[in-house]
Amino acid sequence: EAGVVQSPRYKIIEKKQPVAFWCNPISGHNTLYWYLQNLGQGPELLIRYENEEAVDDSQLPKDRFSAERLKGVDSTLKIQPAELGDSAVYLCASSLGQGGTGELFFGEGSRLTVL
Amino acid sequence: AQSVTQLGSHVSVSEGALVLLRCNYSSSVPPYLFWYVQYPNQGLQLLLKYTSAATLVKGINGFEAEFKKSETSFHLTKPSAHMSDAAEYFCAVTSSRRQLIFGTGTLLAVQP
């Protein structure tokens, strides 16, 4: 069974440019998460989807970040425009349930460097 | 609010020695607690979880953790370290909004 797939693995852009990350969750997982992981820190939730509905986006900086999960499967996270402080790893995860007691399955992450 | 604190950002042990990674939690409700492992350039993988059943939880790769309510702790242990255990380990607790709150991580180095 395929795991959570993310692309691109690495992205280098100049500040003020846009960037997008794509995530394909495990088949059948209805809950999808985007996490931000800064160097030396634990992951922090940006947004959580249950099917196609964003049920928790309170920590998503909506002035520059946006996300979508069309048809409740794949998801895209976009940053426009990117700032130097956005350099980090963006992790996607999925789970069968709502995540509170279940296991989250993580992708390998997309490492963003903003110059 | 729920939170976890991991004591020691870096831990170094010799191969074959005991591994002890510390995690203390804060929660106003009975917590669900987790340990995840992250190998270099990989995503996080669940090691084990506590969900109010047995207080001693066994996970993959010989790791286990004990939930101690009186000490608000959920420390991760392994009797004998392998070189392959070198990775970063994250403790996490479920918040009241059913999201995982991660600690800052402990980087485990295993010396030959």
Image (cartoon, coloured by chain):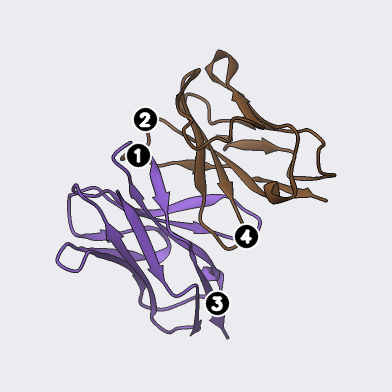
Chain colours: A brown, B purple
Give the amino acid at mark 3. Answer: Ala
> Could you tell me which chain the residue with mark 2 belongs to?
A
> Which residue is found at the position 55% from the left and 77% from the top?
B109
Q: Please report, as a chain letter, where disc 3 is located.
A: B
The image shows residue A39 at horizontal and vertical percentages of 62, 60
Q: At numbered mark 2, what does the secondary structure look like: helix, strand or loop?
A: loop
Q: Residue at x 54, y 59 (%)?
A: A41
The tag on residue B109 is: 3
Are the residues tagged 2 and 1 within 8 Å (C-beta)? yes
Calculate the distance from the C-alpha at mark 4 to the C-alpha at mark 3. Answer: 17 Å
Residue highlighted by disc 4: A39
Left or right? Give the position of B96 relative to A17: left
Q: Are marks 3 and 2 in contact (CB under 8 Å)?
A: no
Q: Tell me which chain the residue with mark 1 is part of.
A: A
Whole-number angstrom distance, CA of label 2 to CA of label 1: 6 Å
The residue under label 4 is which amino acid type?
Leu
- The residue wearing badge 2 is A97
Whether residue A108 can be seen here: no
Dot label at residue A102:
1
Q: Answer whether labels 4 and 3 touch (C-beta < 8 Å).
A: no
| Dot 1 alpha-carbon crowd within 10 angstroms: few under 14, some 14 to 19, many 20 or more | few
Q: CA distance from mark 4 to mark 2?
A: 29 Å
- Give the percent coordinates (x, y) of residue A37: 58, 51
